Amino acid sequence: MAGPGTLKNTMREREFQVETMKSGRSIKRNHVVAAEREGYTGRRQRTNRCSCQRLPPVPKRNDPAPVPYPPAHDNYIEFNAKHVEGTHYHESKSQIVDSKDGHVMELEKSGLIPHYTTKSTFGRVPNYLKNGHSQHAETSSDCQMEPKTTQERPKAARPVNKEIARLQQRWIELEKRLGLISFSRPDKREAIEDELRSIELTLRMAASS
């Protein structure tokens, strides 16, 4: 059998439902809590989830500063002096302003310093020119040998010259025939034109060789 406390809770819940239906929005249920319906057992103890070790306390103002490692008995001044001797000082490059607008360029690349005349190889013939002289001597010796071969060439060139003369004569004859044929005979005109093209091609090849 239900007690008087349960009847009060049910009445409160009914009132809450009626209020929410009238207003059309949800109202926070501060007056009816699940703990009141089920029975409140008290505040639950908070569990400490952090399993890490506690940090040491902050030192006081009068406490001496802790030393994390034993101090080394080295002469830092002598050590730094040895390292400074080995380092090179970065010298700034000299520059020149060559315009009124402030255009800056390096002095070595400007051409105002005699850079190449102070070299030990200035005035000497470079190696690539010496090699060029030797190659030129070889070509000159080859040119001296050419006249002997040119004396033998005319004998071999005579048949070629005869062929060129024959083609030129044939060219003249075909041009005359082409002028006499009327345009009503296109087949004959095309045959003559094709032959003229072939003759022209062979003459050009002979002239280029």
Image (tube, helix red, strand yellow):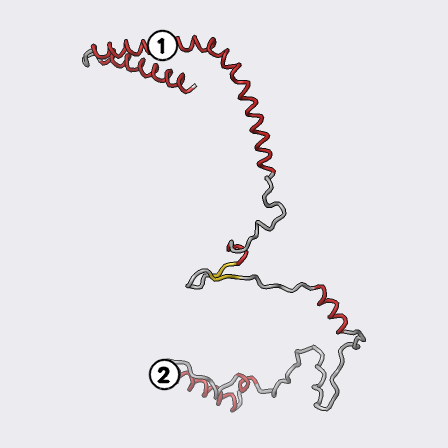
Please state which amino acid type lies under the numbered disc 2.
Ser
Which badge, 1 or 2, is on the more N-terminal residue?
Answer: 2
Give above or below for 159 relative to 48: above
Residue behind mark 1 = 165
Q: Position of residue 161 (x, y in %)?
A: 40, 10
Give above or below for 176 relative to 94: above
Residue at 55% of width from left, 21% of height from top? 142
Q: Position of residue 202 (x, y in %)?
A: 38, 15
Q: Position of residue 192 (x, y in %)?
A: 28, 12
Residue at 70% of width from left, 81% of height from top? 55
Q: Which label belongs to residue 23?
A: 2
> Which image quadrant: the N terminus?
bottom right
Residue at 46% of width from left, 60% of height from top? 98
In the image, 3: left or right of 209?
right
- Comparing marks 1 and 2, which lies closer to the viewer? 1
Please state which amino acid type lies under the numbered disc 1.
Ala
Marker count (numbered): 2
Give above or below for 207 relative to 63: above
Cα distance between the residues tagged 1 and 2: 121 Å
Closer to us: 33 or 114: 114
Q: Position of residue 86 (x, y in %)?
A: 71, 63
**Which structural element holds mark 2?**
helix
Q: Quadrant of residue 39?
A: bottom right
